[in-house]
């Protein structure tokens, strides 16, 4: 059972780095520079808020290893990646990333590093920072146009592929 717990914990630790790296890399692959910047801002705020709260709120971890339990940094980071993809590119693209973020949150509880409140706070921080900085990708390709000549007026929508 201990080796299974170590595998779960190690997988959660790997996902802590893999999800943000894969998310940022995907913005570069599709040449979404605005998305790259939005993701970076959201990630920086997520980390600042998470570590600021960890430093200011003294809460023992369930395994009693230290006082950095609240909030879960693994959860805030991975949920920030998932919610960025959700908001920027759509829910269907974010489903696997939400599943991996959820697994990461589970791995922290399973490793006895966090409780449900730590996980919930981490998820709220990650998702919240994405909502602050991220806009839908499709909106960049759509514009409202207006043209007038003499007594004629034309309103239209242009969509750039």
Image (cartoon, rainbow, N blue to C red):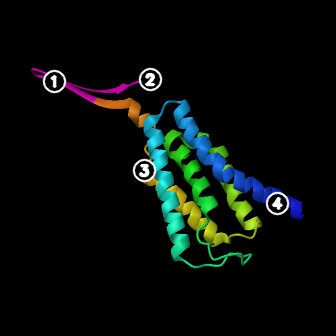
Q: Where is residue 43 in the image (x, y as percent from the top left)?
A: 51, 52
Q: Where is residue 159 in the image (x, y as percent from the top left)?
A: 39, 26
Label 3: how many Cα within 10 Å (few below 14, some 14–19, many 20+): some
Q: Are marks 2 and 3 in contact (CB under 8 Å)?
A: no
Q: Position of residue 83 (x, y in %)?
A: 55, 50
Tell me the residue at 72%/56% (across/down).
12
**Residue 42 in the image: above or below residue 30:** below
Describe residue 102's horizontal placement relative to residue 125 as left or right: right
- Tag in front: 4 or 3: 4
Where disc 4 sits, the SS reads helix
**Residue 35 in the image: above or below residue 160:** below
Tell me the residue at 48%/54% (across/down).
44
Q: Mark 2 points at which residue?
A: 161
Magenta region, residue range = 145-161
Label 4: how many Cα within 10 Å (few below 14, some 14–19, many 20+): some
Q: In which quarter of the image is the N terminus?
A: bottom right
- Tag in front: 3 or 1: 3
Q: Name the residue under label 3.
A: 133
Can the viewer see residue 136? no
Labelled disc at residue 148: 1
Pick the residue in front: 129 or 33: 33
Labelled disc at residue 6: 4
Pick the residue in front: 55 or 29: 55
- Report the magenta stretch's main SS: strand
């Amino acid at each position: 059972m201990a080796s299974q717990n170590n595998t779960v914990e190690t997988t959660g630790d790997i996902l802590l780095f893999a999800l943000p790296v894969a998310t940022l890399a995907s913005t570069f692959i599709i040449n979404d520079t605005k998305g790259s910047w939005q993701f970076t801002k959201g990630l920086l705020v997520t980390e600042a808020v998470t570590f600021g709260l960890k430093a200011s709120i003294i809460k023992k971890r369930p395994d009693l290893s230290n006082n950095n339990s609240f909030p879960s940094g693994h959860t805030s980071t991975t949920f920030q990646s998932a919610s960025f993809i959700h908001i920027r590119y759509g829910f269907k693209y974010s489903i696997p990333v939400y599943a991996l973020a959820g697994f990461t949150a589970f791995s922290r509880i399973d490793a006895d590093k966090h409780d449900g409140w730590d996980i919930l706070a981490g998820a709220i921080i990650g998702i919240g920072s994405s909502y602050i900085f991220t806009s839908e990708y499709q909106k960049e390709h759509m514009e409202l146009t207006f043209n007038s000549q003499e007594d004629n007026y034309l309103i239209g929508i242009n969509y750039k592929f």
